[in-house]
């Protein structure tokens, strides 16, 4: 289990951060394949710019380099993972198009 809660919005090179998490922590078989039984689960969260309490044109928090909409977050994560499911802060499933914030994504099966 890998957890990155409220981290991505603070990192300039978020894609490199995700790639590093995958390379360090994702389970693989002897051939290097990530599609293994009982795969590593990555829980990644970020604020949702679709929410009415978050500014639309630039981050309100001066320490955030980016804030994504739920669709942008989903599109970002699906570049790195074959399975991405969104949840609210209580762990309940939510749709990709949502105004809920923060979004907690459960990601599995990194792409090679």
Image (tube, rainbow, N blue to C red):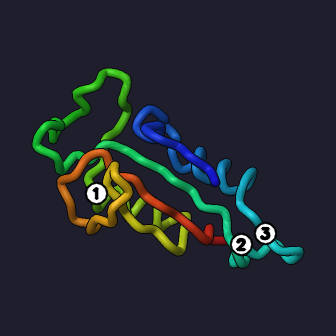
Q: Is residue 4 left or right of residue 100?
A: right
* Mark 2 neighbour density, 10 Å: few (under 14) some (14–19) many (20 or more): some
Cβ atoms under marks 2 and 3 closer than 8 Å? yes
From this viewpoint, which residue is outermost toward the right?
30
Please identify the quarter of the rendering in which residue 92 is found. Answer: bottom left
Residue 34 numbered tag = 2
| Image: 81 above or below 37 | above
Query: Is tag 1's residue or tag 2's residue first in the polypeptide sequence?
Result: 2
Q: Residue 8 location, x and y as percent? A: 46, 41
Give the residue pinned by disc 1: 70
Q: Secondary structure at mark 2?
A: loop
Quadrant of image for the C terminus:
bottom right
Along the line of sight, the residue nearer the viewer: 110 or 3: 3
Residue at the location (18% across, 37% down)?
54
Q: Secondary structure at mark 3?
A: loop
Q: Marks 1 and 2, how far apart in space? A: 26 Å
Q: CA distance from mark 3 to mark 1?
A: 29 Å
Q: Earlier in the sequence, mark 3 or mark 1?
A: 3
Query: Could you tell me residue 77's position as x and y percent?
Result: 46, 61
- Do the CB atoms of the residues marked 1 and 2 lie less than 8 Å apart? no
Give me the residue at 52% from left, 63% from top: 107
112 sits left or right of 29 in the view: left
Binning the other alpha carbons within 10 Å of mark 3 as few (below 14), some (14 to 19) or many (20 upward) gives: some
Name the image quarter holding the N terminus: bottom right
Nearest to the observer: residue 27 or residue 8: 27
**Place of residue 104 in the rendered image (x, y in percent of width and height, measured from the top left):** 39, 53
Q: Residue at x 75, y 51 (%)?
A: 24
> What residue is disc 3 on?
28
């Amino acid at each position: 289990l890998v957890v990155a809660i409220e981290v991505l919005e603070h990192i300039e090179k978020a894609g490199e951060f995700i790639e590093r998490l995958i390379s360090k922590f994702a389970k693989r078989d002897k051939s290097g394949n990530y599609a293994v039984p009982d795969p590593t689960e990555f829980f990644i969260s970020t604020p949702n710019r679709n929410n009415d309490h978050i500014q639309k044109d630039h981050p309100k928090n001066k320490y955030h380099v980016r804030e994504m909409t739920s669709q942008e977050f989903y599109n970002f994560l699906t570049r790195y993972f074959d399975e991405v499911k969104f949840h609210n802060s209580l762990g309940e499933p939510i749709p990709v198009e949502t105004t809920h914030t923060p979004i907690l994504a459960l990601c599995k099966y990194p792409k090679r």
